[in-house]
Amino acid sequence: MLGVALTPSLLSTALQAQSGATAKVLGLQYLNENQRLTVAIIAERILPKSDTPGAVDAGVPEFIDIIYGKYLNEDDKIMFSAGLDGVAERALKLYGKSISQLSSEEQDLLLRDIARASQSLPKSFFLQIKELTVVGYFTSELVGKTVLKYDPIPGRYDPCIPLSEVGNAQWTR
């Protein structure tokens, strides 16, 4: 999954949080509006909308809000909040604007700069938000049904069939 090491506890936590995240009526519970906007922008730059849903479409900001509030320990919460503040400060310092006012290209450059700066660190905000974005995206119901083509009640088992017979998707038959 794009180089993210998934542990059983992380998947279990993701699935518990995802059930709440898909109900977008929850709104914000733990992050403030500026933090949520920053999370949404970063998540959408990591997994943008194309012919598949983007991170915002899949409810990743809501997922991250729940993970932040219910499942992160205090040290991770502090690192995450400081990271969000650092993104906002860096955008103002480099461009004189908030991250939401930057163009997509400027947002990408800003995030690449942050990613490069955190490469040598064993634990960083950027790694944390990237992992949460990928896990939130791939555990969402929308992505499971439209991108991964998850079939909750699979049919018979047919080994060694051409992918063209199942719509070029490995998960549907």
Image (cartoon, helix red, strand yellow):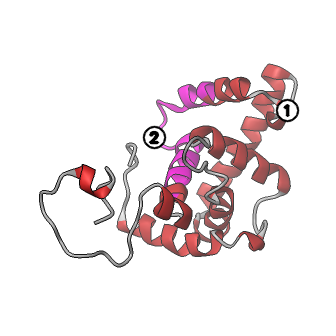
Specify the segment rendered in magenta: 112-135
Find out whether residue 127 is within the magenta segment.
yes
Q: Amino acid at mark 2?
A: Pro
What residue is disc 2 on?
122
Marker disc for residue 101: 1
Image point 78% across, 49% down: which residue? 37
| Marks 2,1: beta carbons within 8 A | no
- Secondary structure of the residue carrying tag 1 is helix
User: Please, which residue is most extreme toward the front here?
Assistant: 165
Q: Amino acid at mark 1?
A: Gln
Q: Is residue 162 left or right of residue 29?
A: left
Task: Quadrant for the C terminus, please.
Answer: bottom left
Q: From what the image shows, is residue 28 above or below residue 148?
A: below
The crowd level at tag 1 (other Cα within 10 Å; few <14, some 14-19, many 20+) is: few
Nearer to us in this view, 4 or 59: 59
User: Please, which residue is most extreme toward the top here?
Assistant: 94
Nearer to us in this view, 34 or 27: 27
- Image position, residue 129 (x, y; %): 58, 48
Q: From what the image shows, is residue 15 above or below residue 83?
A: below
Q: Is residue 20 left or right of residue 10?
A: right
Q: Nearer the viewer, mark 2 or mark 1?
A: 1
Image point 29% across, 57% down: which residue? 166
User: Please, which residue is most extreme toward the bottom here?
Assistant: 153
In primary-sequence order, the first of circles 2 and 1 is 1
- Res. 31 image quadrant: bottom right
Q: Is residue 53 left or right of residue 24?
A: left
- How many numbered marks appear? 2
- Image position, residue 143 (x, y; %): 51, 59
- Image position, residue 67 (x, y; %): 61, 65
Q: Main secondary structure of the magenta part?
A: helix
